[in-house]
Image (cartoon, grey):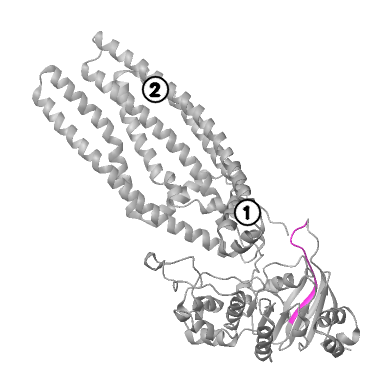
Amino acid sequence: MPVTEPASPQRPLHELAGVWRTAWQAGPWLTVAQMVTTVASGLLPATTVWLTKLVVDGLAAGRVEAAVGAGVGLAGAGLVAAVLPQLAGYLQGEQQRRMDRLMQDQLYTAVNSFQGLSRFENPRFLDRLRMATEATGPALSPLTSGLLGIGRDVITLLSLLGTLYFLSPVMTAVVVGAAVPALLAEISLARQRVGMYLGLSAAMRRQAFYSQLITDVGAAQEVRLFGLGDFFKGRLLRGLREVQDGERRLDRKVLRSQSLLALLSAVVSGLGLVWAVHSATTGRLTLGDVTAFVVAVAGIQGSLMGLVNGIASGHEALLMVGHHSAVRRLGDDLPPARRPAQLLPLRHGIEVRDVWFRYHDDHPWILRGVSLTISQGQAVALVGLNGAGKSTLVKLLCRFYDPNHGVIRWDGVDIRDLDPAQLRRRMGVLFQDFVSYDLSAAENIGVGDVDAIADRRRIEEAAGAAGIHTNLAALPRGYDTLLSRLFYLEEEKDDPDTGVVLSGGQWQRLALSRTFMRDTRDLLILDEPSAGLDAKAEHEIHQRLRTHRAGRTSLLISHRLGTVRDADVIVVLDGGLVAEQGSHDELIALDGRYAQLFRTQASGYGATAVEEIR
């Protein structure tokens, strides 16, 4: 099932307006205060130039009172200039924090709205998502405080240009003309910088992957047993070298461009100074004029460079926020029903009819016309070799994907006509690849029904049903013990009771407890519920499951055929097709695929077990 990559953002004005709506939403008074400080900061340089000119001309002409008055004004301007950056910095930091929180809320709200899994398996989308996650408050400051900085530089530039134009219109044109190449060069570099990061995104993800393998506790034993440390380190360094080579190429372009632009700026300043000195010797300019000219040229060049850099940074930030907006604009990856049908408790059953599915158009078919029925109150078992399509069928039942062909019905209603979130609330599912959360024991169970995550009685009952209550109660802090050593308070880092790591079998039971938190749901799906357990624990768990599944609609997936023999119906998948189905006795009598698999497994337990199926 192909996933279309979001179109490249080409709406800069729209994106800019969106950022400012977000800034205003994050803090209206912060935005207004920043605008006021921007105007004040923009007018300060020109004010300083004119006050400096008045001081110099007053002293040169012997007008002491005028010089002193201008000096007092100059001191006041200096005081304001000292305070304003601190105030602007505080306002900028506070706005960045608020925008960061708001934009992350917007982004992850959008990501959580994707009901399916296909986008999370698309490398191009993952690259875009990574770029979107970097479009946070600090990254967008060129579009908020940076844009205000551009406004400040514009105000400064216009006021200083007015001063310079008063002294020399020709030099004004020369100074402004020298800034045009700088602006074009910076915008080009900004585009190349964003393009480089997007192009190297895959290398960055590989680098992060190998870094995690080397440092992750879950991989540590195999990495050391097989001596994989240097192997993974070599791949990590190759990925890092690829990233750094891209950065180096861009840095060289920046070095060339900036050096040429700096040389151009120095030439313009030098020629202007020579002209000012010559004009002073001929009487065309006063000493105050020369001083004002020198300060104005320096201020104009500084403002121009600030303006150029601000525009270039803003352009780069716009490209970044474009990825953020592109992800937010994406609709649900599963086509939503225009008018979702009402989802009622399961009364009749679930039908899977002629379902075909593959994960991508270029991939082989996983399911090739599967049909089966799970009647209400019936225990159905799904068996087959690895790759037969069992787990894929579970994903389709949960509507993480839609079939390429065929239909799945809940009491006769196509599940594509149901709200996926509502559908999943009617299910209790234990996945084979369940997640071990770095949370407390109680939270690890409570996430099975987040509405009841604070209900300790239900959590302990679920743990008891899975046979893990005694183990969790005996932990250093009972159910409040953190099941990880990843997080801790600084004062607790040397406390061995801060976090506990469970065994694989204990995690299996805990994950099963998570499913038992949904014991009132209509459909119970168990995908290899005893995969990490020893023989005794496996027998105990399946005894508990037999009791729990009695009278419930359930689907059990297991490679161990002895655990499914009491199911009402056993469905054998082979090569993406239903090869056989029936009760255990019926399938044994058929002497087909199921009987062959059962006989093969039973032979490992001796002649008595083999005789049992004859």
Dots 2, 1 in contact, CB < 8 A: no
Q: Which mark is residue 465?
A: none
Q: Position of residue 284 (x, y in %)?
A: 25, 11
Q: Residue furthest top?
A: 282
Q: Quadrant of residue 218?
A: bottom right
Q: Amino acid at mark 1?
A: Phe
Question: Whole-percent x and y of residue 431?
Answer: 65, 74
Q: Position of residue 330 (x, y in %)?
A: 60, 57
Residue in front for this viewpoint, 391 or 279? 391
Please name the residue that numbered disc 1 is placed on: 125
Drawn side of residue 457 relative to residue 542, left or right? left
Q: In percent of the image, x 74 and y 75: which residue is there? A: 408
Q: Would residue 324 be counted in the magenta stretch?
A: no
Residue 440 vertical position relative to residue 297 in the rendered view, above or below = below
In the visual, does 81 lie left or right of 548? left
Q: Which of the 4 image quadrants contains residue 379?
A: bottom right
Secondary structure under tag 1 reads helix
Magenta-tinted stretch: 350-361
> Distance from label 2 to label 1 (Cα)?
45 Å
Nearer to us in this view, 482 or 86: 482
Instruction: Using residue 116 as the reference point, say whether residue 484 is left or right of it.
Output: left
SS for tag 2? helix
Crowd class of label 1 (few under 14; some 14 to 19; many from 20; radius 10 Å): some
Mark 2 surroundings within 10 Å by alpha-carbon count, few (fewer than 14), some (14 through 19), many (20 or more): many
User: Magenta span: helix, strand or loop, mainly?
Assistant: strand
Q: Which residue corresponds to mark 2?
A: 175
**Nearer-N-terminus badge (2/1):** 1
Q: Residue at x 41, y 70 (%)?
A: 495
Tell me if residue 356 is in the magenta stretch. yes
Q: Nearer the viewer, residue 332 or 398?
A: 398
- From the top left corner, tell me how far across and down residue 468 is, in percent: 56, 83
Instruction: Please say whether residue 202 is visible from this viewpoint.
Output: no
